[in-house]
Image (tube, rainbow, N blue to C red):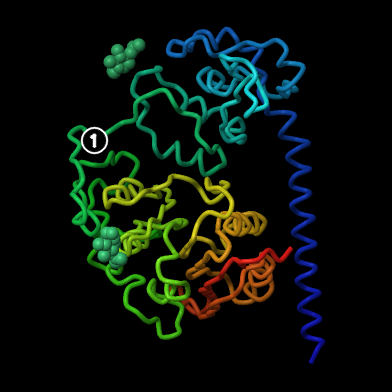
Amino acid sequence: MDSPHKRKCLSSNLFFLFLLLSSNLLTLFFSTTYYSSCSLNPTTNTATNTATTVITTGSIISDPAAKNSDVQVSDNSQTPSDLPPEFIAFTSPQKLPFGVNRNFDSDKLLPPVGRPCTLFPDELRHYMSYKVNGSCPDDELLAQKLLLKGCEPLPRRRCRPAAAQEYVEPYPLPDSFWSTPSDSSVVWTAYTCKNYLCLINRVHNQKGFDDCKDCFDLQGIEKTRWAGSKSGGGLDFTIDEVLAVKKPGTIRIGLDIGGGVATFAIRMRERNITVVTTSMNLNGPFNNFIASRGVVPLYISISRRLPFFDNTLDIVHSMHVLSNWIPTTLLHFLFFDIYRVLRPGGLFWLDHFFCVDEQLEEVYAPLINSIGFNKVKWIIGRKLDRGPELREMYLSALLEKPLQNSW
Ligand SMILES: *[C@@H]1O[C@H](CO)[C@@H](O)[C@H](O)[C@H]1NC(C)=O
Ligand SMILES: *[C@@H]1O[C@H](CO)[C@@H](O)[C@H](O)[C@H]1NC(C)=O
């Protein structure tokens, strides 16, 4: 009886050895190649800097000492002139007006943007070409691609975003929860559909893949998601069943990762629970729609460190998004981050994670187990929507961060 167990241990040990090696190799790779070739050297760009500082009050500095001390020097495989002046203006060290600040332990600020931004100088140049205090280019598609490639946070700051010509304000609460907002609350340029009716109907009319294809129809499947009181032991847990795991009222704040049109947050809101929803705008104005419904959208990708402090959230939920399309090392980082932001006793509801049959046993179950959650529910089922020949599996799990440190 103990040999299959041993084999499982061995395979999961091997797996983590692999993970460890690959993330170390990755670090080595980044530190040897990217750091040296792509970091900025602001000192050679002072001319362009001053040209773009129309709005700031002399806060952009050209510190000759920076070259030697705290700013990595370019090895000239990429000339700094590849990078747009507005990008350099924003990312260059900016001297604090009152000198060294003890909280920062520094006398300057280095405003953050995604390090990979500099790997895409052409796109970056398009993205950062605008008149300071003027209109931003209407280029959401380009912006989102740049962000998804790792240029996150995006560096655009000093222009005014495109807005609908005759913006219509949202419905008042609580009507906004379940009403389709006005088409005039959205800039449609980036999307195939140019109005909400088109988005609602695309599940019938449109072939091919679209993220959350059926979810703009609030009278459709959204109407029943997570509703009801009992799941009957299947993959579809209900919200009330999940909340019943904890003392009433102790789940108060949370996060939904990749939450579509935020129906999860709406249902939680109806229970007086505040949930923030991360979403991209993948061929649909998801962020606008979520905001119009009256809950908070957060425009961040799944690669990013979650913008919450340690041990703070009561619940993190994610449906369909965390799955085998995500590089395994990144998934490992992400699960750890969820563990980090959850308070002790907080819940991680991994809703319909999917992968191919043997991956679950070989890769993902050991990966999830290694994070250290308590298992409250763990349900595995077949995913048949794309046909049984793909041998896809679903996992729905309810995991709890232990109340006591186990390390
Ligand atoms: C910036 O733009 C606003 C709105 O268009 C305008 O009212 C303001 O005068 C501009 N400021 C400068 C310094 O150009
Ligand atoms: C939500 O909070 C309001 C105001 O405190 C209260 O009247 C209402 O009963 C609460 N609803 C639920 C479902 O707990």
In the figure, 228 relative to 148: above or below?
below
Q: Residue at x 60, y 23 (%)?
A: 109
Q: Residue at x 35, y 47 (%)?
A: 287
Give the secondary structure at mark 1.
loop
Give residue 288's position: percent from left, percent from top.
Answer: 31, 45
Residue type at tag 1: Ala
Residue 146 appears in the figure? yes
Q: Quadrant of residue 253?
A: bottom left
Q: Nearer the viewer, residue 69 or 286?
A: 69
Looking at the rendering, in which quadrant would you find the C terminus?
bottom right
Q: Nearer the viewer, residue 22 or 231?
A: 231
Q: Residue at x 76, y 42 (%)?
A: 29
Give residue 292's position: percent from left, percent from top.
Answer: 27, 48
Outermost bottom residue: 1
Residue on which the image places disc 1: 164
In the figure, 241 relative to 1: above or below?
above
Crowding around mark 1 (Cα neighbors within 10 Å: few <14, some 14 to 19, many 20+) is: few
How many labels were placed on the picture? 1
In the figure, 399 relative to 124: above or below?
below
Residue at mark 1: C-beta within 8 A of ligand 1:
no
Q: Nearer the viewer, residue 175 or 304?
A: 175
Q: Quadrant of residue 219?
A: bottom left
Give residue 45's position: percent from left, percent from top.
Answer: 61, 12
Residue 205 appears in the figure? no
In the figure, 252 relative to 10: above or below?
above
Q: Residue at x 62, y 23 (%)?
A: 101
Ligand 2 rendered quadrant: bottom left
Q: Quadrant of residue 221?
A: bottom left
Give residue 357's position: percent from left, percent from top.
Answer: 60, 76
Q: Nearer the viewer, residue 301 or 63?
A: 63
Looking at the rendering, in which quadrant would you find the N terminus?
bottom right
